[in-house]
Image (cartoon, grey):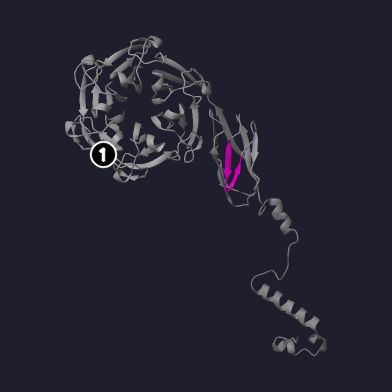
């Protein structure tokens, strides 16, 4: 193959014949290339042989590892994630390092995707995410805390009955709702006795309202009648609101026991309006906010309703059709929602029983799913993949932790604000056993409420008892 030198006059005018040899021509080409680099601002081909080594010594351009320390990890099962990589530290591990190193200047973000066990929860330090800055990350701290849930029975024999008395001398018949006031009194929706019972702070059980016969009668104390009262809530004035399921009404019991109807016609329907002009169909649960607004799980209508202090009823969320659709107002759907809870911001949390999910309704009516895959199960872990089996009751504490009466799993579950579901108490077997953590047992727990000291009260339906859970 022939080669033609560039037609630059200064090059072609050379009298030296050796400049036309291939070796000479190659040298000229290299010189031209180096000259061009110099003209573009280069250093004329001068390279510092120590630059690469110095860059590596400074950590620039070198992949780095991400890790840290672990404290309090008991059983195995904790799963951490950074990018696409997952890591499962062994039981009792005190440190962790992700295998995949990442480049200097790249972002990292460590998260917990499953908790280590039923009665332990872990949290991450604030530096769990950031940008690699020419050094390994080794200061992330994962702190795990073991929780002991001590379960006891405060009233009820375990068999159906209607006796007043103290502790095990008292009896209930399928208690489906539980609530408490600021004075330490506990109120029970004693569903199959058609009564509202009261447990004083000293453990004495009395009947607040209802004569024990099914009916729909307002009036003082035990002259009033209910039809399968299922849900309760107490306002700051000590008034007790009742989801009177069989009468399709929302009833109100004053502190002296006098019963009145706040809203509902007494016949099944879904009409909005004031007082008796409104209608419900099998309302199961109620919650009340600081302004005295009552929220209703209108179960057979698959709706979440709202009742003002004066008895005006509106629909907060739900189309009325069965489903699991999220969205705003009547775009959303539920499937036999039972109990609910409301926080200080007016956000309503719903045990969407038929969908095996926990749903959230904003004050404006926007519905989203908080936890639950939608399939029946008892899986702990991240909220979206965790599962429940007919969750019936729900409560919220002052820091945003949700507690769920997972009725057909016979468990009390916990959902933390970082989206992790764990089991707080219960063996999963239907029985009446006091004890700690999984040594305790329930039988179809129906509802629960948080006491002012952070303890939980549970209406343990098929055990016909009221239980208390103390976390230690």
Residue 148 visible to the viewer: no
Q: Is residue 349 magenta?
A: no
Which residue is label 1 attached to?
315
User: Between 346 and 313, which is closer to the camera in this rendering?
Assistant: 313
> In the image, 270: left or right of 168?
left
Q: Is residue 329 above or below residue 33?
A: above
Name the foreground residue: 136 vs 275.
275
Q: Provide residue 115's location: percent of width, then percent of height.
A: 54, 34
Tell me where residue 32 sits by quadrant.
bottom right
Q: Residue at x 58, y 48 (%)?
A: 84
In terms of secondary structure, where does tag 1 sit?
strand
Q: As rendered, which of 202 and 462 lies closer to the eye?
A: 462
Whole-percent x and y of residue 472? 51, 21
> How far from the left and from the top, in percent, is residue 376?
45, 36
Quadrant (top left, top right, bottom left, bottom right) of the N terminus? bottom right
Measured along the vertical axis of the image, is residue 163 above or below residue 418? above
First to last magenta residue range: 78-87
The quadrant in which residue 54 appears is bottom right
Residue 283 seen anywhere in this rendered image of the structure: yes
Q: Main secondary structure of the magenta part?
A: strand
- Say which of 72 and 277 sits in front: 277
- Number of numbered tags placed on the structure image: 1
Q: Residues within 10 Å of mark 1 (few under 14, many from 20)?
A: many
Which picture quadrant has residue 170? top left
Q: Extreme left residue here?
A: 277
Q: Position of residue 319 (x, y in %)?
A: 29, 43
């Amino acid at each position: 193959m022939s080669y033609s030198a560039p037609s630059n006059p200064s090059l072609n005018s050379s009298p030296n014949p050796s400049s036309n040899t291939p070796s000479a021509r190659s040298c000229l080409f290299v010189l031209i290339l180096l000259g061009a680099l110099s003209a573009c601002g280069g250093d004329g081909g001068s390279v510092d042989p120590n630059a690469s080594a110095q860059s590596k010594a400074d950590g620039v351009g070198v992949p780095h590892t991400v890790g840290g320390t672990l404290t309090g990890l008991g059983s195995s099962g904790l799963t951490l994630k950074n990018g696409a990589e997952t890591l499962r530290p062994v039981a009792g591990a005190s440190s962790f390092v992700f295998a995949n190193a990442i480049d200097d200047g790249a972002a990292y973000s460590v998260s917990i995707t499953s908790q280590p066990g039923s009665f332990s929860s872990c949290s991450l330090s604030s530096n769990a995410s950031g940008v690699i800055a020419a050094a390994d990350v080794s200061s992330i701290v994962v702190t795990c805390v073991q929780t002991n849930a001590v379960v006891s029975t405060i009233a009820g024999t375990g068999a159906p009955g209607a006796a007043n008395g103290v502790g095990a001398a008292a009896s209930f018949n399928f208690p489906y709702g539980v609530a408490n006031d600021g004075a330490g009194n506990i109120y029970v929706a004693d569903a199959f006795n058609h009564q509202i019972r009261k447990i004083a702070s000293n453990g004495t059980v009395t009947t607040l309202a209802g004569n024990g016969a099914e009916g729909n009668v307002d009036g003082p104390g035990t002259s009033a009648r209910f039809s399968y009262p299922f849900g309760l809530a107490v306002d700051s004035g000590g008034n007790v609101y009742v989801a009177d399921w069989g009468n399709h009404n929302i009833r109100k019991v004053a502190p002296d026991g006098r019963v009145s109807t706040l809203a509902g016609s007494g016949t099944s329907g879904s009409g909005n309006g004031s007082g008796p002009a409104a209608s419900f169909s099998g309302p199961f649960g109620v919650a009340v906010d600081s302004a005295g607004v009552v929220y209703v799980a209108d179960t057979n209508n698959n709706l979440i309703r709202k009742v003002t202090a004066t008895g005006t009823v509106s629909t907060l969320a739900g189309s009325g059709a069965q489903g699991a659709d999220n969205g705003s107002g009547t775009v959303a759907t539920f499937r036999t929602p039972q109990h609910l809870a409301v926080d200080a911001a007016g956000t309503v949390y719903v045990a969407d029983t038929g969908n095996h999910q926990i749903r959230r309704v904003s004050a404006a009516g926007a519905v989203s799913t908080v936890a639950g895959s939608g399939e029946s199960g008892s899986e702990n872990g991240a909220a979206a993949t965790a599962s429940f089996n007919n969750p019936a009751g729900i409560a919220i504490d002052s820091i945003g932790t949700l507690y769920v009466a997972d009725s057909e799993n016979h468990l009390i579950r916990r959902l933390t604000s970082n989206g992790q579901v764990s089991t707080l108490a219960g063996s999963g077997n239907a029985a009446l056993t006091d004890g700690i953590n999984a040594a305790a047992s329930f039988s179809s727990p129906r509802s629960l409420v948080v006491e002012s000291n952070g303890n939980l009260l549970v209406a343990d339906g098929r055990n016909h008892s009221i239980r208390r859970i103390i976390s230690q």
